[in-house]
Image (cartoon, rainbow, N blue to C red):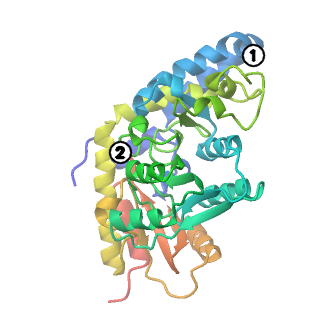
Amino acid sequence: MSDSPRWGAAAREAWRLDPAVAYLNHGGFGVTPEAVFAEQKRWRARIERDPTYFHTYEVEDALRAALVPVAKAIGADTKDVVFVENATTGLNAVLRSLDFEPRDEILITSLSYPAIRKAAYYAASRCGAHVIEAEIPLPLADKASLLRAIAAKLSIRTKLAIFDHIASHSALLLPADEMTRLAHEAGACVMIDGAHAPGQIPLDVASVGADWYVGNLHKWFFAPRSCGFLWASKTMQAMTRPLAISHGYGEGFRAEFEWTGTRDVTPALATPAAIEFHESLGGPALMARNSALVREAGQLLAERWRTGLAGRSDAFAAMVTVRLPLTGEATGARANALMRELAERHHIAAAVVALEGALWVRVAAQAYNEIADYERLAALFAPAP
């Protein structure tokens, strides 16, 4: 595929990436560009000139101004969005805001991120509620099979359903709006875990129709770690509170999340620069290019290894998960050891996961990647002729 001069190996100079590393795990923790670090440094210098004045008189206006481009980028009203440290923090805030009762059910799927699964089990354990898991077999055959699996687990006792927009380990892009509609028809509230969606795909959170949507800005939108957002529908804002109750309590949704105690707000304040950087690389054009590159990479890996993907090729955005041609135990410990070996011996950053009794590798595509990066990975596991 042909690339814009803004993309490929030449683009790496915008980041601090080790030139020896084939970095195929942008979805893991994101990579912050130099230009965004510079903006964060500028904010830190401004704050340190008079921290008392800034945190007393300026921080609220600064955070609300920083939310304007964020809201525009995710299709939201600024009054419906607040900054949180990451998607997990936002999701936990919602779980702690809800009053679960014995026999209530929280619905998740087998694709849910492990941290979210544990948060759901913790919330349920505090009051005798139950976590119900919809099993989604891999490779995912089609959207209809996913929706059937979810519908089969919904009941009148389902108080909250938590669905991924882009599932972390499998990298599958899921129909968030259709899953939401299905759960609402059953009488459940819905939270969408969009940790990987902002900046990876065009996003309009309001049109999804969920009650809450959480996402990260430090992954695909290039903000400094840690920076994410929580969007809440207007009907849910009054009962949605941050994990840390502080001076903003009782003053409304935005005020409560803006002041949760003294903290580093510079990742949030640098977010406009991060979104501007994303747009400078093409914005929607960059997203489309990354998706095309990762599909090419997924096909390359699957063909070289004579295996397959975790779903149809059109079920992925800028990440794809491919089964490794390995036999033997498929455990989390083995996956972690293999991931470390890739990093230390071969200078390849890629996520290795154990799913469905097999080992898989998840690779991402970002502006600094090109097909040669995936060729390096493909050669390591190519079966003998």
- At 56% from the left and 36% from the top, the residue drawn is 230
Q: Residue 139: x percent and y percent?
A: 39, 73
Residue 62 image offset from top left, x and y in percent: 59, 17
Q: Which mark lies nearer to you, 1 or 2?
A: 1
Q: Amino acid at mark 2?
A: Ala
Query: In which image quadrant can residue 182 be found?
Result: bottom left
Image vertical order of residue 221 relative to residue 67, above or below: below
Q: Amino acid at mark 1?
A: Pro
Position in image of residue 93 (x %, y %): 67, 41
- 317 left or right of 349 in image: left
Res. 10 mark = 2
Quick check: marks 1 and 2 in contact, CB under 8 Å? no
Q: Residues within 10 Å of mark 2 (few under 14, many from 20)?
A: few
- Sequence-first disc among 1 and 2: 2
Q: Secondary structure at mark 2?
A: helix
Q: Residues within 10 Å of mark 1 (few under 14, many from 20)?
A: some
Judge whether 22 appears above or below 276 on screen: below
User: Which of 53/347 is in front?
Assistant: 53
Report the front residue among 310 and 380: 310
- Identify the residue position indicated by label 1 in the image: 51
Distance between mark 1 and mark 2 Cα atoms: 39 Å
Q: Is residue 51 above or below residue 262?
A: above
Relative placement, left or right, of 258 versus 205 is: right
Give the x, y percent position of residue 290.
Answer: 33, 50
Which residue is at a point 44% across and 29% down the rendered structure image?
A: 76
**Residue 14, labelled with which disc?**
none
Quadrant location, the N terminus: bottom left
User: In the picture, residue 128 is in which quadrant?
Assistant: bottom right
SS type, badge 1: helix
Residue 28 visible here = no
Q: Is residue 254 visible?
A: yes
* Quadrant including the C terminus: bottom left
